Amino acid sequence: MSAKTISILNSPAAGDVVNASGVLTITGLSPIKTGTMQSLQVQRNLVSTPQKWRSTFTAGSGVVCAFTLQQTVNKLLKSATFKSTETSTSAVMSELNDFFGASATYGSATFTASTEFDVEYRYASDILYIKGTTENPICSVIADVSNTSTISSDMSLTLETQANVNATAIVFKVTGHGLSTGSTVYVGTLTGQTAANSKEWRVIYVSADTFNLADPVTLATVNATGTGSAVGAVTLVAQPEFGTPSYVDADAKLNGSAQVTTQTTYNYSAVDIVPFYTSDVAPNPSMRTAPCRVWIPDAGATTAVSSTGQSLLSTLAALVI
């Protein structure tokens, strides 16, 4: 739907509730009778920010250097294959420059923009690094079957030692992790704390170096068994930029709102509300409001009802039939 009113709840209030009379009250909006609500769409945000995908290819003497690069450009999948049998780094670099349409220098620590693809690349110490651009951050690199080297992703975050408290939310530590509440990660196999294994989880920001993980549907945190540290790595899941602070600001501006986001450590979820009345005049004029979109930060823990963004979203989701 096209929203007519944008409200950004940077700090959800304790009064943002559905009361006993069935009236939905949200900060900055006129009260809405839930019995006359035509539609309510809750869009939980599951965004990874930033969405950078960098693959590494290790080339070696006598090894065929071959991969396929894929990227979506203007909603169309663009795919191209690179293959080189050269054994010297300078020769591989020359062929890579021809492929990417640029003039990167071997050994440089700086990424060079490709003119053929919406990616940047560099080649150093026999490792080729490829990543998407800010405007088009997602790309994939697939190893050719003739390639005897390996390709891996650096979206993996290696966990550091962090003590836990039994039966409470596991605290995961990665110094300078750069995640926001609402980001999504996949956990493969951890040791020390295994309850999170083999599943995608929603990030809950705790600090610049620590975070919890919650079920993306129920929002229940994954709890520790014992006091040991989680050992292993988690992998970022790249997704569309829905709900990042910059996205919300752009949406508000597009709809004529002067509001801006202030919660930079949280992503935002959207609630689209359309009230419906059986007559042109509502039983109580104060109950009337225009169709609206409410952006709510996915704030912290799911504690007291509607005192945080997540619990407010859960309350709203419960209204959807």
Image (cartoon, rainbow, N blue to C red):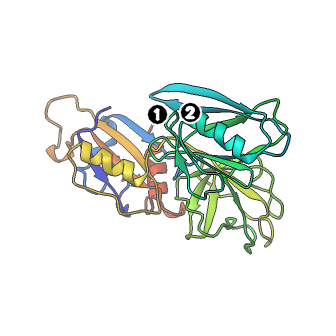
1 and 2 marks in contact (CB < 8 Å): no
Side (left or right) of 39 relative to 309: left
Q: Quick one: 262 or 273, which is closer to the camera?
A: 262
Residue 7 in the image, given as x and y percentages of width and height: 28, 51
Q: Which amino acid does the dot numbered 1 rest on?
A: Ile
Total marks placed: 2
- Look at the image and tell me whether residue 177 can be seen: yes
- Place residue 282 in its image quadrant: top left
Tell me the residue at 81%/29% (across/down): 145
Instruction: State the CA–CA distance, disc 1 to disc 2.
Output: 38 Å
- Disc 2 packing (10 Å; few <14; some 14–19; many ≥20): many
Q: Is residue 162 left or right of residue 256?
A: right
The residue under the point 33% across, 39% down is: 273
Q: Quadrant of the N terminus?
A: top left
> What percent of the width, then of the height, locates residue 250?
31, 47
Assign a secondary structure to mark 2.
Answer: strand
Where does label 1 land, which residue? 321
Q: Residues within 10 Å of mark 1 (few under 14, many from 20)?
A: few
Mark 1 or mark 2: which comes first in sequence?
2
Number of the front mark, 1 or 2: 2
Q: Determine the residue positioned at 38% across, 48% down.
A: 247
Residue tagged 2 = 71
Mark carried by residue 243 = none
What kind of residue is marked 2? Gln
On screen, residue 101 above or below 270: above
- In this rendering, position of residue 233 left or right of residue 16: right
Q: Quadrant of residue 293?
A: top left
Asked which secondary structure carries label 1, the reply is loop
The location of residue 230, given as percent across then percent down, is 77, 65
- Left or right, 318 with respect to 233, comes to left
